Amino acid sequence: MPFTLATWNINSVRLREPIVCKLLAEEGPDVLCLQECKSPVDKIPMEQFRELGYHHMIARGQKGYNGVAILSKLPIEDMGDQDFASLGHARHVAGRLENGVTIHNFYVPAGGDVPDRDVNEKFGQKLDYLTEMRDWFHAEAPEKAILVGDLNIAPREDDVWNHKQLLKIVSHTPIEVEHLTDVMDAGKWVDITRQDIPEGLLYSWWSYRAKDWDTADKGRRLDHVWATPDISNAGHGSRVLRAARGWEKPSDHAPVFASFDV
């Protein structure tokens, strides 16, 4: 059953409902994973999404912060969630499609501004979250699975606009990259985006602080699509919908797509 999946940090699903609908109508992914929904589950505007063919949703939410949702044209079974680092945040939800593929949708903590856990509690929480992800996937040994989301780390030198300048900036520090690599290794995850686009600068996030984000192009690849080795060869067609960053009242993230012939 071939299907196309997209992941997008939407930065408030209710505020940005019009551009979610635009994406669903124009691009029509079979599955859309959203992060930072900033909404209780019962307040997510599902009526509009159903009108576009997305009759299935599994989600975890909270008022004003965090929140993850999987919208699907295809039937999907709720496979639960994990509260890594015991933060009490809605940062993970998993669903299983009828073809047996499990989709994990993650919103990893951003980590604050200072990359030092001794002076910045949020940075410590981020590292702890990633450590518990690693341990869970060591124990879980995922199979026939896809992991997507805003992982808030740009791991490669060509995932950021300037590697040297960002080495001490949260999201690209060596310790964060090391922790993310440990998560990948624990689940034997394959980076599908970079499998398809192995070389060159590639971003999915551009700060709101840049007056002309497109011209400045100081981006980072914070949003990821991974798959387990048993289905990684079925992944293809990866792309970042950069144009969405310029839509009306945009998120600071752009959607990332991949297709799977599973």
Image (cartoon, rainbow, N blue to C red):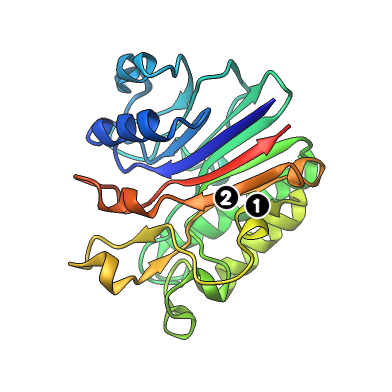
Residue labelled with disc 1: 192
- Asked which secondary structure carries label 2, the reply is strand
Q: In the depicted view, which residue is nearer to us: 147 or 201?
A: 201
How packed mark 2 is, by other alpha carbons closer than 10 Å (few <14, some 14-19, many 20 or more), is many
Q: Tell me the residue at 31%/43% (across/down).
A: 11
Q: Residues within 10 Å of mark 1 (few under 14, many from 20)?
A: many
How far from the left and from the top, in percent, is residue 204?
43, 57
Numbered circle sitting on residue 238: 2
12 horizontally vs 127: left or right: left
Query: Which residue: 65% across, 47% down?
Result: 236
In the rendered structure, the answer to whether residue 194 lies left or right of residue 62 reads: right
- The structure residue drawn at horizontal position 19% and vertical position 45%, both measured from the top left corner, is 249
In the displayed structure, would residue 60 be above or below residue 38?
above
- The residue depicted at 71 percent of the width and 35 percent of the height is 261
Locate the N terminus by quadrant. Answer: top right
Q: Position of residue 29 (x, y in %)?
A: 49, 32
Residue at the far bottom in the pictured view? 164
Tag 1 and tag 2, C-beta contact below 8 Å:
yes
Q: Measure how far apart labels 1 and 2 are at the Cα level.
A: 7 Å
Coordinates of residue 103 in the picture (x, y in percent): 62, 33
Kind of residue at badge 2? Ser
Q: Quadrant of residue 68?
A: top left
Hey, which quadrant is residue 139 in on the image?
top right
Q: Relative to 134, is 139 above or below?
A: above
Compared across the picture, whether 70 is left or right of 21 comes to right
